[in-house]
Image (spheres, coloured by chain):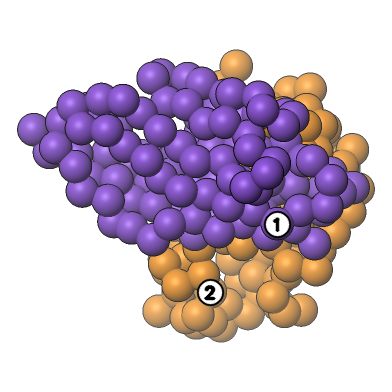
Amino acid sequence: DAGVIQSPRHEVTEMGQEVTLRCKPISGHNSLFWYRQTMMRGLELLIYFNNNVPIDDSGMPEDRFSAKMPNASFSTLKIQPSEPRDSAVYFCASDVHTGIGGYTFGSGTRLTVV
Amino acid sequence: GNSVTQMEGPVTLSEEAFLTINCTYTATGYPSLFWYVQYPGEGLQLLLKATKADDKGSNKGFEATYRKETTSFHLEKGSVQVSDSAVYFCALPANQAGTALIFGKGTTLSVSS
């Protein structure tokens, strides 16, 4: 298995632009998680899905952030409009069942908003 | 909800030294506990886990014992190597419903030869 695949690996964008981050979970994993990592705040859970359904989005910082999972093999995290304070590494992770085993993380997308 | 606290870093050791990274938690019930490791430029990887009290998780020479009396899950290794240099995260489910994991702030380990 190729693992959790995230794209792009790096994204540099100007303030105000729309940014879309993509994630392909491991086949057969039915839980998907989006995290944001910064030096100041560490790893923050943004949203997670179970069987393609959003379960908890309380970590999404603002309405500028949205996430979708149209099918079991694809998820997106969108920021519109982007701001410099959104600069971070965004990780996607998948799991067979929420909280039971261990997550498999993607390599992350490093977002820089200038 | 549950919470986790791990020792501040960085931790700097010489090769073959003994490592301890402290992790304590607050939780309802007895959730599974995890240690993850992050190498530079990569995502987190599961290092070890323990699913019930007194369980010992182990992997690659690392160990951690689930201590419900002290609500701790300290990570140990008897002899570290330069290749162990990474950031280590303690984690547990956010609440008793077994939802998403929450992570400690991470402890950076630097091992020199």
Q: Chain of mark 2?
A: A
Look at the numbered disc 2 and give the secondary structure of its residue.
Answer: helix
Determine if residue A84 is in view: yes
**Pick the front one: B34 or B39:** B34
- Mark 1 and mark 2: span between their CA atoms? 30 Å
Mark toward the viewer: 1 or 2: 1
In the image: residue B61, left or right of residue A54: left
Residue A77 is at least partly visible in this image? no
Q: Residue at x 19, y 42 (%)?
A: B13
Q: Position of residue A29 (x, y in %)?
A: 77, 28
* Residue A104 place in picture, x, y as percent: 61, 32
Q: Quadrant of the C terminus of chain A?
A: bottom left
Seen from this angle, which residue lies furthest front?
Answer: B69
Q: Is residue A99 left or right of residue B79?
A: right
**How many neighbours does mark 1 have within 10 angstroms: few (below 14), some (14-19), or many (20 or more)?**
some
Q: Which quadrant of the figure has residue A16?
A: bottom right
User: Do the residues at pointers 1 and 2 share their chain?
Assistant: no
Q: Is A86 rendered above or below residue B1?
A: below
Residue B75, position as x, y percentages in the image: 46, 37
> Residue furthest toward the left?
B113
- Which residue carries the number 1 mark? B26
Q: Are marks 1 and 2 in contact (CB under 8 Å)?
A: no
User: What residue lies at 54% left-to-right and 37% top-to-bottom?
Assistant: B35
Chain letter, orange in picture = A
Colour of chain B in the image = purple
Residue located 85% across and 59% down the image: A56
B17 to A13, vertically: above or below: above
Classify B13 as above or below B4: above
* Amino acid at the residue labelled 1: Thr
> Residue drawn at (25%, 29%), measured in percent from left and top?
B80
Which amino acid type is shown beneath numbered disc 2? Asp
Task: Give the residue at mark 2.
Answer: A86
